[in-house]
Image (cartoon, rainbow, N blue to C red):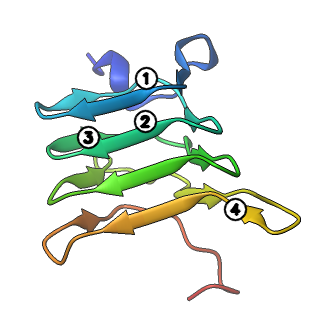
Amino acid sequence: MTPLWCDRDSTQDITIRDTVVWERIMYLRGNLYIEAGGSLSIRCLASMPAGSHIYIAPGGKLLLEGGTLYQSCGREWQGIIIGSSGDKAGVFEYTDDAVVRDVFLDDSVR
């Protein structure tokens, strides 16, 4: 039986609007949205479902502080999208020991 977190379920999307810190393993089941004014610090393993993505809105912030973003079922997810509008953009920061893996890259990116 396939775990529920292997495939994306659009009814399980998560939206971050405040300051949030993840310090224990997370198995997401949908896309992750970080709104303007929202900040998410990931200090753990965070598994993204196949086909999902993270969207950082202008004014939002994702901090990967030694954490790992990956797909725990051996498939691929769609990566991180950094939104922009005028001179505002989302922010993605990471430490040297942070890891992002299992992301689908089309030929134009490789």
* Nearest to the observer: residue 38 or residue 100: 38
Between label 3 and label 4, give the one nearer the viewer: 4
How far from the left and from the top, in percent, is residue 15? 55, 24
Q: Earlier in the sequence, mark 3 or mark 4?
A: 3
Q: Residues within 10 Å of mark 2 (few under 14, many from 20)?
A: many
Nearer the viewer's eye, disc 1 or disc 3?
Answer: 3
Look at mark 4 in the image and give the residue it sits on: 89
Q: Element at badge 2?
A: loop
Specify the label residue 29 is tagged with: 1
Alpha carbons under labels 2 and 4: distance apart: 25 Å
Residue type indicated by callout 3: Ala
Residue neighbourhood size for the residue with mark 3, other residues' Cα within 10 Å, grouped as few (<14), some (14–19), many (≥20):
many
Task: Kindly identify which numbered label has been placed on residue 93.
Answer: none
**Image point 47% across, 63% down: which residue?**
92
Q: Residue at x 25, y 45 (%)?
A: 42
**Residue at left offset 39%, top offset 31%:** 19
Q: What residue type is labelled 1?
A: Arg
> Residue 87, relative to residue 15: is it above or below?
below
Question: Alpha carbon of mark 2 to alpha carbon of mark 1: how far?
Answer: 6 Å
Question: What amino acid is at disc 2?
Answer: Pro
Badge 1 element: loop
Viewer-proximal residue among 86 and 95? 86
Q: Mark 2 points at which residue?
A: 49
**Sequence order check: which comes first, mark 2 or mark 1?**
1
Mark 4 is surrounded, within 10 Å at the Cα level, by few (under 14), some (14 to 19) or many (20 or more) other residues, namely some
Q: Are marks 2 and 1 in contact (CB under 8 Å)?
A: yes
